[in-house]
Amino acid sequence: MSPATPAPESGGAALELLVHGVGGATPQDMLDDPRTVRITGDRTAAMYRRAEDVDAEAHPERYASRPVPEAYCWSNLTSGDGARALWLLLLPFMVVNLAHWMRPPSRGRRGLVRLYGVVVRLVALTLTVLLTAAACEVALDLTAWQCAGTATCADAYSWLGFLSADRGGWWSLPGRRLALAALVPTALVGLLWYLSNRTWSAYEAQRPPTGHDAPVETPWTGPQPPVGTRPAGTATPAAEPTGPATAVPEELGSDPVEQRPALGRPGFWYGRRLVARLRAAHTAAGLLTVSAALVTATARHDATTPGGAGAVIGPALQAAVVALSVLVVWVVCRRGRSERRVDLHVERALVSWLPGASLALLALTALYAGWSRPGWTSTGTLPGDAFFGALTLVQGGLVVALGVVALLLQRPGRNPRTALRGLGGPAVAMLACALGGVMSGGVAQRVADWLDGPGAGDGGHRIGPPVLLSWQASTIPVLLLLLLVPAALLAVRTVLAARRLRATVEADYDTTDERDPVRTGQIASGRARAGLTDSAPVLVGVVSGATLLLGAVSVAGAWASGNVPGRAFDGAHPAVAAVASATQALGSWMIGFGFLLFVTWGRRAYRDASARRTIGILWDVGTFWPRAAHPFAPPCYAERAVPDLTWRMSSWTRSTGGRLVISGHSQGSVLAAAAVWQLSPATRGRVALLTYGSPLERLYGRWFPAYFGPDALRALHRTIHCWNNLYRATDPIGGPVRVPAEDGRPAVDAAVLLDPVAYGRTRRHPLPEPILGHSDYQADPAFALRRTALLDQLLPAMPRQRDPHETVDQGSSGRSSG
């Protein structure tokens, strides 16, 4: 594909800004030239041109008949160095962050919108507590309390010798063992804080071009072309959205902020302050969880020996933990995102004081636990096992409450294509809790099996995690069996759809003279498989609903029996007892295997760049949204990419007065649309949008209706100069954006592209053409035609009005990308 396509001779300067999709792409591939130069940006994300086009602005006569191609490469934002493999640990946090953005659209119901955000942030807080509690379970309970307190287990592992209760060393006292083991979960919380703080400085610090940082727009004040010569559906560059005027700060320009969609607000891609607040709260929550594990066990022992100082200090420390926990919850609930303006304030007192106070309390708790307590021995499991059950109930209650709020937010005229009727957020929040439970249970189960390997321990006691974790592991085989039913139904439906589509395929290609049943079947099957994407809400709903129900059964079974499933049904019918034992064994094996697979994948990603790029594809989809619910989630690359694109479009149109078409494939189309939303009306009047293989409606519109729903996409169509969307029936990701013609503007979607472009062998295509699906849209002849048509619709180049403070250089550094 040639990146330069003919444009009108009279159109003047034109720039084609290419944005790749998931998985990344090299600038050489995007520009179809091995010689490329980075003209602006860094190694993480940058704009590239062909070497011969670096000085294009200085020689406009060379580009009178074609646009200047320029590629924006952002793949290193999600798949960079080996440290990105650590992001696998943050998968539950990423998923719960998505739930925040899945709320249904609403108008005039700010209280419910705020309540929805508060509930999601509370669910996210429970995940931080759960992960820290799992680390405490492994380090404090299984290792320091159970294994070090059992002679056979401690003797089997030499590295535990100094903690062994039988050897009588200084560290052999239970409290001191617990205090030393508390370093492990504390280090985990510190690692999460470090990753969040590091990415916070790199991602959330990118200011959007608003206020004093915005390039000064030079609106076109010259004569407008006659109405009869303007292409249908275009608007003047400075066209403002219709509606009542709203007062806004002077530095934000003349575009009323309240009239913009959410993605167009100045502060949408600048969440620095909120992430800092949430990072402080979640760091404190993790440290307080460790403190609670220490003080609960120690205070319970001191309660059996009245009269000592510990009987007073223990409850005082517990009260301090509760007080700081209440403060953490208040901080999480108090404030959400500030999107209507760029919030540059920093709450230094809160950010520094809350984690510091929690760390100081943890240190005091460790000193309290380390006192000498003659006669204190560690038997059974560490006190506090009921915590996991209580946390599971809290998570389930919050998810149910989130579902109620989502239903209340639904408008009577809701879009029927919205995923799960607006309950996508609660369903995904439930999945996040399930992922957190599987990861936590997997770690605890594997460590327990490893430590329990040498023997059963003294007195027949086996090293084991809390009973609830065994019950939760036992539900995994049941959940997989439940999934077989919708999976089988979808498979049958796909086969039947492929048969029905055979007639449609033959009609599309007019195969009267060259009908080939095998070729027809391949194309029809490709179209049918692509349609499976639209069935994803069904699977998500089944998994979430079953997870909620099975989680409740697990808590009830663990609390009612007080034993693992294999022993809880000892007196039941032999068949029932056999099923319970089988599910427990199979679930334990599966959860352990899943954890080992998870660790292996992360290790491979750390060493192998290609595997890291595969993981990066997952982050491309999951980390588009800012960290609004969980500060330890992987960082939002769009908070860097969207300002990059917005700055580039604004600066180029301001400097040259020329036309610009931003061309986005797959996830790149979402970035392109988000960047266009951020532009001022004057700049949008000189920009055309070309999307292809785009998930704007099929994925984002259905799952994030408040931000990419029908109203938002129609508003984008009205405010941008012109927009075309290309898609194929065989594409499992991209699809139509379903924006109809209105107000004299044509529909956004072009006619569906045939894939393959030729049914059989022809003179033009002597070899069989492949079914491309989601890739190589530029290879279709319709792509070049649509791009040229968009450039034709844009207004001619404006007279250049140079800023006296502007330099001639267009940002070229002359640095080779190679």
Image (spheres, rainbow, N blue to C red):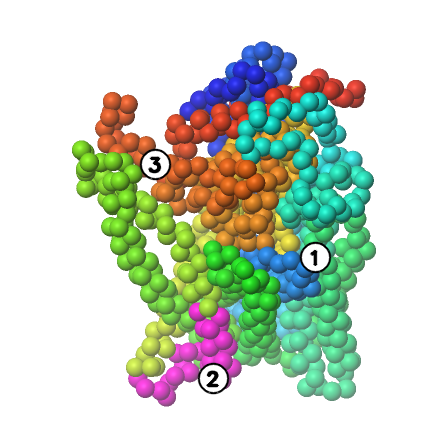
Q: Which residue is mark 2?
A: 561
Q: Of callouts 1 and 2, which one flags the residue occurring earlier in the amino acid sequence?
A: 1
* Residue type at numbered disc 3: Leu
Instruction: Check the image and report above or below for 741 versus 764.
Output: below
Distance from disc 3 to disc 1, alpha carbons, whole Å, reads: 46 Å
Q: Is residue 87 visible?
A: no
703 part of magenta stretch: no
Q: Is residue 755 visible?
A: yes
The front one of 213 and 197 is: 213
Magenta-tinted stretch: 546-574
Instruction: Check the image and report above or below for 350 versus 782.
Output: below
550 part of magenta stretch: yes
* Residue type at numbered disc 2: Ser
| Mark whose residue sits in front, 2 or 3 | 3
Are the residues at dot 2 and dot 3 in contact (C-beta closer than 8 Å)?
Answer: no
Residue 87: image x %, image y %?
Answer: 55, 49
Residue in the image at 23% along x and 28% along y:
761
Q: Which residue is mark 3?
A: 754
Instruction: Check the image and report above or below for 641 versus 61.
Output: below
* Magenta highlight: main SS: helix
The count of marks equals 3
Q: Which residue is mark 1?
A: 336
